[in-house]
Amino acid sequence: FIDSFYSQPNSSDDIFKDLNSIINFDPSSHLEDINKIQPDTISIQSMKRNYLDKFIAKQRPPIISDVMHCFNEWLGLFCMFQINTSFTAQIFLRLFNYMCKYLVDKIIITINPDHENEHNLVDTLKSNLEIFFLWSESQGLEPIANKYFYPISKLLEFLLAKIENLKDLKTAITQCDALNSQQFSSLFNKWDRLHTKSKLKQEWKNEAIEHARMHNDTKN
């Protein structure tokens, strides 16, 4: 599910066809559904199961629009069952925190660029995160998303930074304060295969890791 942030939609998916309706979804639109349900048959668990079954039934790996659709279904259920906004915020707070940690670990540790599809993982992540932040803003979840997606946002900035010399690299590392020296070391091992904007010399990488150890490790 979270891997969809690194998935590039196929042309046949036509992700942008209904993107506006996905991003600007109105959770209260689900309120009309409650009138169609007999009170004694209402079950949050069964309704969640129904939405999950529809999601699993898709004949392709999930893409970012599927994630937004799923989140919208949840928001609709919360609105239908009058879940208060504070509790809703707590749910998404925990969810976003987990998602961000997974996304960071995925690109630093798990992903093997040689075994991925022939698309630019960095640009794909950038495009999908932009869609995610547009959605979070429209749903009033922007403060939570900005806070808990901060590490992956800083990592993306680092991957897209224009680095021409060692000074630029050290500056970029200092600004990417969400990562520690071990994470940078792992990232540099696959740097040249991530289609990043800048090429780094090995001696730069060695000094950069030491720089991160001195400046970033105290924060992480």
Image (cartoon, rainbow, N blue to C red):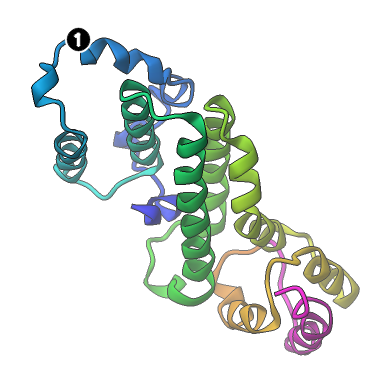
Vertical arrangement, residue 145 with respect to residue 192, above or below: above
Q: Residue at x 69, y 66 (%)?
A: 178
Q: Residue at x 20, y 42 (%)?
A: 52
Question: Within 10 angstroms of label 1, few (less than 14), some, or many (20 or more) residues?
Answer: few
Residue 208 image position (x, y, % from top left): 79, 82
Q: Can residue 120 be seen by looking at this rendering? A: no
Residue 8 image position (x, y, % from top left): 41, 48
Q: Which residue is mark 1?
A: 35
Q: Nearer the viewer, residue 172 or 23?
A: 23
User: Magenta part of the protein: which range?
Assistant: 197-220
Residue 203 on the magenta span: yes
Instruction: Write down the quadrant of residue 144 in the picture.
Output: top right
Residue 214 on the magenta span: yes
Residue 130 image position (x, y, % from top left): 58, 39
| Left or right: 99, with 144 as reference point | left
Instruction: Write down the quadrant of residue 188 in the picture.
Output: bottom right
Q: Amino acid at mark 1?
A: Asn
| Left or right: 130, with 50 as reference point | right
Secondary element type, mark 1: loop
Q: Can residue 114 be seen by looking at this rendering? A: yes
User: The C terminus lies in which quarter of the figure?
Assistant: bottom right
Q: Nearer the viewer, residue 147 or 18?
A: 147
Task: Give the mark count.
Answer: 1
Residue placed furthest toward the front:
40
Q: Nearer the viewer, residue 82 or 75?
A: 82
Residue 155 image position (x, y, % from top left): 65, 62
Q: Nearer the viewer, residue 169 or 144?
A: 144
Q: Residue at x 62, y 78 (%)?
A: 183
